[in-house]
Image: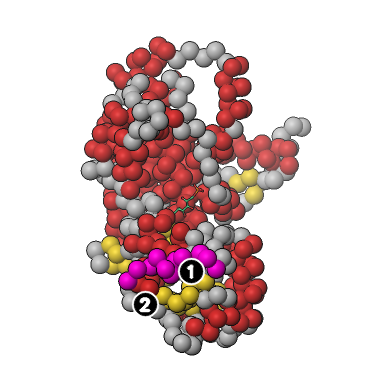
């Protein structure tokens, strides 16, 4: 029985068990371990016809002994200190050339640290960005690989087989060493937050502005899912809006508490954008909106302080703003959010000297993951001909969409503002586009202020050099 399996997997919660079944289904023999023996036993017992491919281990030592050398062991456990704890026990059992793959939503700096530490022992550490939730893990996730070339050679072929396929092409690609895969997944999540927030803002306009019920909105999203906005998130929005609550028979969405959760990955995307000096205003607005939503008690108190009256404006709204305007606005907001996400990736590519292949990133996101969409094929097409440094706003395809749709975005944002309907992500998308296209910005005044109070100096438009003025003399 020794050394009989191709790969090992630790952690048999929903993601781990689904991925293990996916791996076994592709014909690989897999050794599995969970710290709860009953969980491992139940998993193997319920794995049906795949059970002949699955070998359970009662401890890490026997798990390691079951795997062919050089070993590949996938961790699907809670991100953070549990990963460090498992590594601490596992590493002494491993040998030079073995690879540990962390498939959790890990902060990329943790992967860099773990990777450097394990390198001293000749053990390779991979931060694998994995998207698609439990369904993706079972049927084919989108995978973003960050690790050594050695590990990519070793486990890349297996990962490409288990990944979802788009036109027969696996949605799994090499992003670069150590933290590159986790970084790409973090930006995926930042974009995921922005996409979701903008959809929620459009829902807010339909609900509070047009006075529509969930059932009336669902077909609109279904229709949009057949056009340029076609995506998993639009598709599930239509479905979610159609579901009724068993207890009250009201639309289920109407009885859900309006406080958004977040595990931190969207926030990490914003932090990285800030560190890299990239303006990612739509992603920032989406993360901030989740935080604001979470403070429901504060919102209820604040609402009592104001006497804003939007009745008149809201009555007019459906005569002014059409569903087509909303569709256009959402599309343009999406362009801004993705332009920001790819700009963060581009800055990280330069900063960390990672390959981060833009076309392949767009391609691995086309299927399996939460942000999968027709839109990502458009981005992949842009990067097939344009340089990685290209801001997506300026790519001909997207520039045309912006030229055609900017009036609709302006109309939607301005009327939402007049109606007191918060649209922070859409508004910031509009300002991002306008700011990016502002040939002459207002930063000359900021430079003057900086020089006035701090002698920071300024440059002039008409000649070279740095200048300082005694402004208050
Ligand atoms: C995915 C998702 C997933 C993410 C959740 C939760 O690609 O499958 O991005 O990995 O962690 O969507 O995120 P929040 O709890 O922060 O919303």
Where's residue 199, x and y in %?
Answer: 39, 37
In this view of the protein, which residue sits in the foreground, 235 or 58? 58
The answer as to whether callout 2 falls within 8 Å of ligand 1 is no
Q: In the rendered image, which quarter is residue 157 located in?
A: bottom left
Q: Magenta part of the protein: which range?
A: 37-49
Where's residue 39, x and y in %?
Answer: 51, 64
How far apart are the two marked residues, 1 and 2, measured between alpha carbons? 14 Å
In this view of the protein, which residue sits in the foreground, 139 or 285? 139
Q: In the rendered image, which quarter is residue 363 located in?
A: bottom left
Where's residue 388, x and y in %?
Answer: 40, 61
Q: Which residue is mark 2?
A: 52
Please state the total of marks drawn on the protein image: 2
Can residue 37 be seen in the rendering of this structure?
A: yes
Tell me, yes or no, whether the highlighted magenta stretch contains residue 406: no
Label ID, residue 192 = none
Residue positioned most to the right: 473
Q: Which residue is mark 1?
A: 41
The answer as to whether callout 1 falls within 8 Å of ligand 1 is no
* Disc nearer the start of the sequence (1/2): 1
Q: Residues within 10 Å of mark 2 (few under 14, many from 20)?
A: few
Q: Of helix, strand and loop, which one carries label 2?
A: helix
Judging from the image, the colouring scheme is secondary structure
Q: Residue at x 48, y 69 (%)?
A: 41
Q: Main secondary structure of the magenta part?
A: helix
Left or right for 230, reference 416? left
Q: Residue at x 57, y 30 (%)?
A: 296
Query: Disc 1, disc 2: CB below 8 Å?
Result: no
Q: Of helix, strand and loop, which one carries label 1?
A: helix
Can residue 183 be seen in the rendering of this structure?
A: no
Q: Residues within 10 Å of mark 1 (few under 14, many from 20)?
A: some
420 w.r.t. 387: above or below: above
Q: Residue at x 38, y 22 (%)?
A: 209
């Amino acid at each position: 029985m020794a050394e009989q399996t191709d790969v090992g997997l630790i952690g048999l919660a929903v993601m781990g068990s689904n991925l293990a079944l996916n791996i076994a289904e592709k014909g690989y023999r897999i050794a599995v371990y969970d710290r709860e023996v009953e969980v491992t036993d139940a998993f193997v017992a319920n794995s049906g016809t795949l059970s002949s491919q699955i070998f359970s281990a009662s401890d890490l030592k026997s798990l390691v002994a079951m795997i062919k050398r050089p070993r590949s062991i996938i961790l699907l456990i809670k991100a953070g200190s549990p990963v460090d704890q498992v590594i601490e026990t596992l590493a002494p059992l491993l040998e030079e050339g073995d690879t540990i793959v962390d498939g959790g939503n890990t902060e990329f700096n943790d992967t860099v640290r773990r990777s450097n530490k394990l390198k001293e022992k000749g053990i390779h550490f991979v931060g694998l960005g994995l998207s698609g939730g439990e369904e993706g893990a079972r049927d084919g996730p989108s995978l973003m690989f960050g690790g050594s070339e050695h590990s990519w050679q070793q486990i890349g072929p297996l990962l490409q087989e288990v990944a979802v396929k788009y036109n027969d092409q696996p949605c799994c690609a090499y992003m670069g060493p150590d933290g590159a895969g986790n970084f790409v997944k973090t930006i995926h999540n930042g974009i995921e937050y922005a996409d979701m927030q903008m959809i929620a803002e459009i829902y807010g306009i339909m609900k509070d502005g047009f006075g529509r019920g969930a059932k009336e909105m669902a077909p609109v999203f279904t229709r949009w899912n057949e056009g340029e906005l076609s995506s998993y998130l639009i598709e599930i929005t239509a479905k979610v809006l159609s579901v009724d609550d068993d207890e009250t028979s009201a639309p289920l969405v109407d009885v859900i508490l309006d406080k958004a959760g977040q595990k931190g990955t969207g926030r990490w995307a914003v932090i990285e954008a800030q560190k890299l000096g990239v303006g990612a205003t739509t992603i920032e607005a989406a993360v901030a909106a989740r935080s604001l939503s979470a403070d429901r008690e504060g919102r209820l108190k604040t609402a009592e302080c104001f006497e804003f009256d939007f009745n008149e404006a809201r009555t007019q709204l459906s005569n002014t703003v059409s569903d087509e305007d909303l569709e256009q606005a959402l599309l343009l907001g999406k362009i801004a959010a993705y332009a920001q996400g790819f700009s963060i990736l581009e800055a990280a590519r330069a900063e960390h000297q990672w390959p981060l292949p833009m076309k392949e990133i767009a391609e691995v996101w086309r299927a399996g993951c939460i942000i999968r969409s027709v839109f990502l094929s458009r981005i992949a097409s842009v990067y097939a001909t344009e340089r990685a440094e290209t801001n997506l706003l300026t790519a001909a395809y997207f520039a045309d969409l912006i030229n055609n749709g900017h009036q609709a975005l302006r109309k939607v944002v301005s009327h939402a503002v007049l109606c007191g309907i918060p649209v922070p992500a859409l508004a910031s998308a509009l300002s991002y586009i306008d700011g990016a296209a502002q040939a002459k910005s207002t930063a000359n005044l900021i430079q003057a202020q900086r020089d006035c109070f701090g002698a920071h100096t300024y440059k002039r438009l008409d000649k070279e050099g740095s200048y300082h003025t005694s402004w208050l003399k």
